[in-house]
Image (cartoon, rainbow, N blue to C red):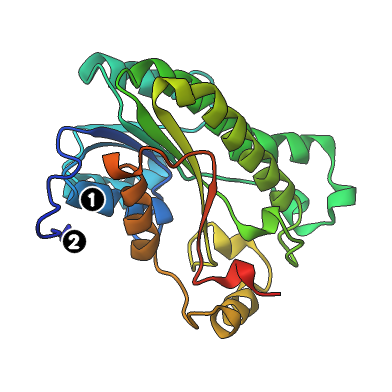
């Protein structure tokens, strides 16, 4: 697991400290992003969902030389706060935050939006949207010199994508949250972005029915005729953490080979 070194830019994020939430394994979008941040010189804190996930994430955290490695289940009382408390105690600052988690109970995700029960809807929104809002709240006082917050979204927030269902509703709420938080924190030099990759074969995507067909369609119709990789997403995301991107905020960045512009 070699972390790439970009010649001439390898220290572009040197001295910057970032929190990565959402690495499940080496296919995760969050892993692609973490590798790119690290390659640019950033120091990273990494979280894992639970003990079961730990064995998959720990070797990746070691490859990143992460000094902070902690459990974080956003549905577990107090765990989110503990992570930010430790970051504050050990680092005293945070320069960027990557939120790359989403969840919907199977019954809610696989059914029609109109049939979703309250409990399924609330859990979908809690994990997929509110957790980002909460992390932004906790990260704000640590971003004393400005910073960047990232979350992951998908085209199904804007258009009806077959089988995306209630997750599309949650991602639409998440994108609205990005805009409002960007407006609120912008005066402090904090930028907020929603990253919208094209379909990727991640563990999270495996829960969406007929996902292979979705990927085939994306590859055949995207202007670039190619699927994105976690490394493509990582490099583009890391760019937005650089000082050169300090006036870009509040938007949805599509990394999908242009698929979102095609009817």
Determine the residue located farthest toward the right in the rendered image.
114
**Residue 110 vs residue 188, the one in the foreground:** 188
Q: Which mark is residue 59?
A: 1
Could you tell me if residue 247 is visible in this image?
A: yes
In the picture, which quadrant includes the C terminus? bottom right
**Of pointers 2 and 1, the one earlier in the residue sequence:** 2
Callout 2: 10 Å neighbours few (<14), some, many (20+)? few
Numbered label tally: 2
Residue 178 falls in which quadrant of the image? top right
Residue 51 sits above or below residue 82 on the image: below
Distance from Cα at disc 2 to Cα at disc 1: 9 Å
Residue 20 sits above or below residue 223 on the image: above
Question: Percent from the top left, x then y, of residue 247?
Answer: 40, 38
Question: Percent from the top left, x then y, of residue 225?
Answer: 50, 83
Q: Residue at image x 58%, y 76%?
A: 218
| Residue 254 falls left or right of residue 2 | right
Question: Percent from the top left, x then y, of residue 121?
Answer: 76, 39
Q: Which mark is residue 159?
A: none
Could you tell me if residue 81 is visible in this image?
A: no
Q: Residue at image x 40%, y 68%?
A: 229
In the picture, which quadrant includes the N terminus? bottom left
> Are the residues tagged 2 and 1 within 8 Å (C-beta)?
yes
Residue 260 falls in which quadrant of the image? bottom right
* Element class at badge 2: loop
Q: Residue at image x 30%, y 49%?
A: 34
* Element class at badge 1: helix
Question: Percent from the top left, x then y, of residue 21?
Answer: 41, 39
**Residue 192 vs residue 3, the one in the foreground:** 192
Residue under numbered circle 2: 1
Q: Residue at image x 23%, y 50%?
A: 59
| Residue 158 falls left or right of residue 37 | right
């Amino acid at each position: 697991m070699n972390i790439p070194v970009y010649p001439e830019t390898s220290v572009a994020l040197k001295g910057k400290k970032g929190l990565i939430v959402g690495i499940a394994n080496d296919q995760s979008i969050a892993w692609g992003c973490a590798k790119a941040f690290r390659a640019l010189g950033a120091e990273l804190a990494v979280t894992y969902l639970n003990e079961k996930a730990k064995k998959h994430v720990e070797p990746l955290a070691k490859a990143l030389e992460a000094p902070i490695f902690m459990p974080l289940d956003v549905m577990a009382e107090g765990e989110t706060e503990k992570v930010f408390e430790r970051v504050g105690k050990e680092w005293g600052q945070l320069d960027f935050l990557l939120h790359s988690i989403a969840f919907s109970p199977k019954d809610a995700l696989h059914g029609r939006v109109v049939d979703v029960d309250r409990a399924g809807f609330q859990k979908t929104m809690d994990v997929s949207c509110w957790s980002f809002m909460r992390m932004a709240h906790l990260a704000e006082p640590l971003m004393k010199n400005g910073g960047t917050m990232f979350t992951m979204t998908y085209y199904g927030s804007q258009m009806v994508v077959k089988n995306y269902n209630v997750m599309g509703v949650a991602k639409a709420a998440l994108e609205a949250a990005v805009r409002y938080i960007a407006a609120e924190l912008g005066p402090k030099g904090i930028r907020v972005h929603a990253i919208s990759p094209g379909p990727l074969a991640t563990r999270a995507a495996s829960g969406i029915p007929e996902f292979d067909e979705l990927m085939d369609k994306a590859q055949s119709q995207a202007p670039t005729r190619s699927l994105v990789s976690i490394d493509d997403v990582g490099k583009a995301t890391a760019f937005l953490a650089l000082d050169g991107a300090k006036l870009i905020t509040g938007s949805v960045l599509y990394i999908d080979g242009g698929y979102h512009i095609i009817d």
